[in-house]
Image (tube, rainbow, N blue to C red):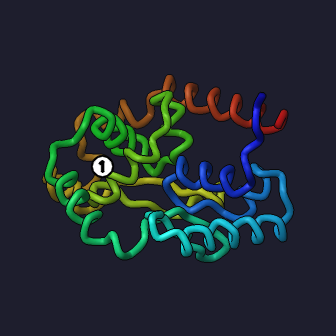
Amino acid sequence: MEQTLTREAQLESILFISGEPVSYKQLEKVLDISREELLATIEKLSTRYREDVSSAFMLVTHKETLQLATKSELRELIEMITKSTLQESLSKAQLEVLAIISYRGPISRTEIEAIRGVNCSYTLRALLLRELIERDGNPENLRGYVYTLSNQFLLSLGVASPEELPDFEQLSQDKRLTEVIATELAVDSDEAKTL
């Protein structure tokens, strides 16, 4: 017998997998609820996190966006693991995403995922923590972001701009990648319409 998850559990899972702020409008659409229901769900989940001392999580709301975060009491522990992660070499996934951003940026997470075929939230977060990439508002989608190389990354490579990267002209204009992105975004759009 299949049990239906609570609204709080659904919201929690969306925030967990997103790894970045999610707009109220997007949450209303995905959860198929009104603003009042969303705010009530946020309050229930937030209260649960506050009252449960064994929970590591809290909700951060800012400019009608919501993000799952760890409680401030865990800051030192998180900093230790973050520093450890930053000192390790880049993983294959991080190198792939960094290469995509290098040659195709500014680029959205959805476009990166269309090229790689897998979710990139945690990889993007790790690259942001290492300050190898930067995130800006997406002019084509006000609810999303686009990613570009950071100045720090360019300095570490000894180049003044991405255009100085090897084979930049050829790789940044590769029509096959443009077609892959367009096809994947069209499929995602069609699937969203059927929901």
Could you tell me residue 52's position as x and y percent?
Answer: 52, 69
Quarter holding the C terminus is top right
Where residue 89 sits, quadrant-wise, is top left
Where residue 21 sits, quadrant-wise, is bottom right
Task: Tell me the residue at 14%/55% (across/down).
Answer: 156
Residue in front for this viewpoint, 159 or 100: 100
Three-letter amino acid code of the residue under disc 1: Pro
Residue in front for this viewpoint, 86 or 127: 86
Task: Judge left or right: residue 18 versus residue 189.
Answer: left
Task: Tell me the residue at 37%/31% (across/down).
Answer: 171
Task: Judge left or right: residue 105 versus residue 52.
Answer: left
Residue in front for this viewpoint, 18 or 153: 18
Question: Residue farthest to the top?
Answer: 176
Quarter holding the N terminus is top right
Element class at badge 1: helix
Residue in front for this viewpoint, 22 or 79: 79
Could you tell me residue 162's position as x and y percent?
Answer: 30, 49
Task: Tell me the residue at 40%/49% (across/down).
Answer: 124
Please say if 20 is above or below 101: below
Task: Judge left or right: residue 118 versus residue 159.
Answer: right
Task: Judge left or right: residue 89 versus residue 23.
Answer: left
Could you tell me residue 87's position as x and y percent?
Answer: 14, 53
Please say if 48 is above or below 134: below
Task: Tell me the residue at 55%/68% (across/down).
Answer: 49
The 10 Å Cα crowd at callout 1, few under 14, some 14 to 19, many 20 or more, is: many
Please say if 78 is above or below 179: below
Query: Which residue is under mark 1?
Result: 162
